[in-house]
Amino acid sequence: MVAGWEWDETLFQGTAPYYRRGRPPYAPGLADVLADVLELDGRGRLIDVGCGPGTLALSLAHAFRETVGVDPDAGMIAEAERGAAGTGAAGRTRWVRARAEELPLGLGTFTVATFGQSFHWMDQDRVAATIRDLLLPGGALAHVADLKPADRSTGPVGSVGSVNSVSSVDGLPYPAVPDAAIGALVREYLGPVRRAGRGVLPHGTPGGEAAVFARAGFSGPERHVVPGGQPLERTVDDAVAGVFAMSFSAPHLFGARRDAFEADLRRLLWRASSSGRFSGRVPSTEVRVWRKSPAGPASQPSQPS
């Protein structure tokens, strides 16, 4: 957990309706890569921890007998349920509103656990140990994330950390989303320190997942990069959704000034592109797979102090 910050239920409050539209998609082919690497055959069980609106879980549900998504935000769980119904996966999925720290919750054992850009919000050592005990011998944990800009040298040419981090869109018809100007506008309304629920994160969220998973007794990782770089067109509405889909600019943080902020944001976006359209590229997706030993005693999850 981040020093000096405590999780609270408002972290992603109000972001769920904007999430699918505003967040960049995972690279095409992610589900196929995971199915191949993890040798999925439709018979196992998946637990997706910090599932959000089901983005990752629903893309993999066809490859498992049952998929369980866990998330503490009621709006995210509602969106995941709607998504499952819309894709015909309702009979193969289950959605549980809970923090990862509350597991195991009697959910049984799993062949695969996934974290889709969610692990950094958790009590990492405690959750990693618990997930290891939830996995069957030989099970796998897959940590999935957009390939960060600092990792571009090891990824495909043209890969980016996120849609809104694109600084150049050579060969594409529209300008990039004006990231720097949007960030300045958010700071004008919310202050210079990154917001996170009722608290702030002056130094951002933690990294170091490799050391955490190793301490929990996992072996690995096996690293896989799913190539991105495909052209991605965004509208003004998409860009607005991208801002409201983030924890540090969640709608509730603006309080009574929300409408004023959105009006200023839309004016900024229209000034940046008179067509109301923007170009970007789909980020590459990085997958790090950690394995549980096929035999041997399980570690015990940390207990709350």
Image (tube, helix red, strand yellow):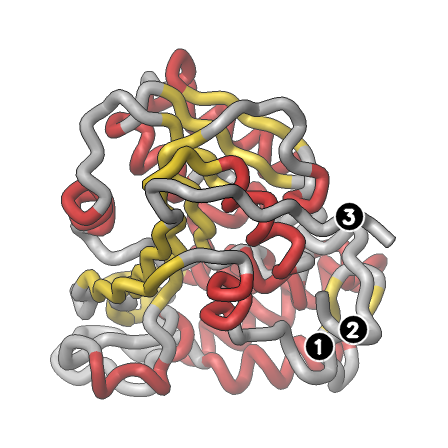
- Are the residues at dot 3 and dot 2 in contact (C-beta closer than 8 Å)? no
Residue for badge 3 = 303
Residue for badge 2 = 200
**Which of the numbered marks, if any, corresponds to residue 194?**
1
Out of 13 and 280, give the one closest to the viewer: 13
- Are the residues at dot 1 and dot 3 in contact (C-beta closer than 8 Å)? no
Look at label 2 and name its amino acid.
Answer: Val
Query: Which residue is found at the position 71% from the left and 39% from the top?
Result: 102
Out of 254 and 285, give the one closest to the viewer: 285
Residue 210 vs residue 27: left or right? Answer: right
Locate residue 174, reporting x and y percent: 25, 74
- Earlier residue among tags 1 and 2: 1
Q: Residues within 10 Å of mark 2 (few under 14, many from 20)?
A: some
In the orientation shown, which residue stands out farthest toward the front? 296
Residue 274 vs residue 170: left or right? Answer: right
Where residue 231 sits, quadrant-wise, is bottom left
Q: Give the CA distance from mark 3 to mark 2.
A: 26 Å
For the question of whether residue 18 can be seen, the reply is: yes
Where residue 24 sits, quadrant-wise, is bottom left
Look at label 3 and name its amino acid.
Answer: Gln
- Are the residues at dot 1 and dot 2 in contact (C-beta closer than 8 Å)? yes
Query: Which residue is found at the position 22% from the left and 63% from the top?
Result: 224
- Earlier residue among tags 3 and 2: 2
Residue at disc 1, secondary structure: loop
Locate residue 228, reporting x and y percent: 20, 65
Look at label 1 and name its amino acid.
Answer: Arg
For the question of whether residue 73 can be seen, the reply is: no
Which of the two marks, 3 or 2, is nearer to us in this view?
3
